[in-house]
Image (cartoon, rainbow, N blue to C red):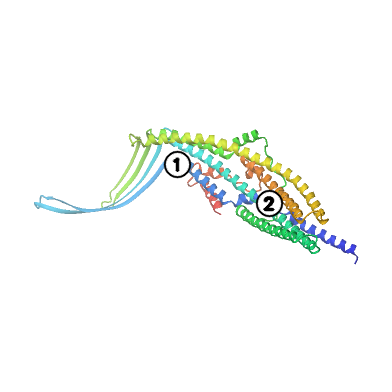
Amino acid sequence: MTTKTVRRALQGLVLAGAMAVAPIMAAGETLADALAGAYEHSGLLEQNRALLRAADEDVAIAVAALRPILSWSASVSRSFGHSVGFNPAKQKYAKTGFVSNSADIAVTASLLLYDFGATRLRVEAAKETVLGTRESLVGIEQLVLLRALTAYVNVRRQTETVSLSQNNVRLVEQELRAARDRFEVGEVTRTDVSLAEARLAASRANLAAAQGNLMRAIEEYRAVVGRKPGNLQPVSRLPEIERNPDKAKAIALRNHPDMKETQHAINAAELNMRRAEASMMPTVQLSGRMSKTEDFDSLASTDSRSVSIDVGGPIYRGGELSAMARQAIARVQAVRSSLHVVTGQVAQNVGNALAGLQVATASIEATERQIRAARVAFRGVREEASLGQRTTLDVLTAEQDLLDAETSYTSAVADQTIAAYEVLAAMGLMTAKHLGLNVQHYDPAEYYRLIKSAPVKSVQGEKLNRILRRIGD
């Protein structure tokens, strides 16, 4: 078999192997897959969804105070004892015993008629708290997805760094062999060989460090996404973001969940302040009672019914109500001040994220030029060293410069991807819905719609039970 025939056969085998591997590579894990996995796996999201459902129940609890309150009671009693009295017939004091057995059952009802709006204000404050908690859940969702994005990019960054370090070790091994060969023929000194040996040891140490960083990146990915990373594909394109700082900040101030959460907190605090003031006023309540008492000894029974309108209010409670009103006012002032703080933080985060994106983009352009220049320099120095015009140290230095440039480029690309999504998060848009992830989106209003009217035994209550069973599963 001729050399040409062997070469053609090998080319055919390589082509067939590439065609077989291509579908596997194409089926690799994408960034969208990782983000979807983090969204569905996150225990932090589940925890805060449960907290939101707990806040939803506060609305039902507040609404219940406006509904009739029914209660029942039952008792069975036995009374016994004796009495001492004067008996005129016997002209002496005598002791007389008695025993009585009876049962009592009663049903009571009460309805709040008027309390100067205190309970209504409590309901509205609870609704504002629910809305604020929903925005807090959006903020947690952003943190989870941004952490998953960072883990994905860092696995790719460290994988490429390990590959570069392995190539560097192979190149330094070649340089060491070349230095030893030249030393054998007297072209270089023992110093050149020692320099190559030292550089090889350093390259192997760098490789070990890169492999350790990759292992940590994989563990972070597993913790966030819930599975070990597969064949992670490159991020094909960056998200569409507003690069004008003023426009980006304006979007953030409208959409960021921290801004909305604080605004709902202000509304809730103001409602609670009005509620504290209304709690000093009297309340009007309608009450009713129906009872039946049965005497087992005499077989006598008594039925009674009563209806009353009760009016009452505080007169003096040691200054407690006034202190609560002042406390509510102070909380309103505090949460209003926090809005100013949050506004500044949101705007600053947008500016910082855009600055980081600009730095990463500029670094990519600079490192690309650095790689081209370092590659030309390395080839030239290596060629000159073969002619005896350069030392082994020159070759190793040029090779290290090329490695540093390639590593910097890898990090700059990773930093640009992370920075772009940080801008998206700073504007409040790092959500599963905005990113179009293929997941079952959690509807925070579904549970609220079922409990806001405080269902007990109804079709609505059965739907609620089904949702709770599904969440438990």
Task: Read off the residue under disc 1.
Answer: 64
Q: At 34% from the left edge and 50% from the top edge, which residue is drawn?
A: 74
Left or right: 171, with 460 as reference point = right
In front of the other: 98 or 365: 365
| Element carrying mark 1 | helix
What residue is drawn where x is 56% and y is 44%?
Answer: 137
Question: In the image as oriented, which residue stretches furthest toward the left?
Answer: 91
Tell me, yes or no, whether the two marked residues, 2 and 1, touch with CB atoms within 8 Å. no
Which quadrant, please, contains the C terminus?
Answer: bottom right
Res. 248 in view? yes
User: Is 170 rendered above or below residue 339?
Assistant: below
Q: Is residue 276 left or right of residue 466?
A: left
Residue 47 or 243: which is nearer the viewer? 243
Residue 223 image position (x, y, % from top left):
60, 54
Q: Look at label 1 and name its amino acid.
A: Ala
Mark 2 vs mark 1: which is more N-terminal?
Answer: 1
Q: CA distance from mark 2 to mark 1?
A: 56 Å
- Name the image quarter holding residue 433: top right
Tag of residue 190? none
Using the image as rendered, state which of residue 369 and residue 451 is in the foreground. 369
Q: Residue at x 76, y 49 (%)?
A: 374
Query: Badge 2 local density, few (<14 within 10 Å), some, or many (20+)?
Result: many
* Residue on which the image places disc 2: 157
- For mark 2, give the secondary structure: helix
Q: Position of residue 243 (x, y in %)?
A: 68, 37
Q: Is residue 99 visible?
A: no
Q: Position of residue 420 (x, y in %)?
A: 67, 42
Q: What crowding class fits label 1: few (fewer than 14 Cα within 10 Å), some (14-19), or many (20 or more)?
A: some
Amino acid type assigned to the residue bearing label 2 in the image: Arg
* Quadrant position of the N terminus in the picture: bottom right
Specify the quadrant of the image occupied by residue 165. bottom right
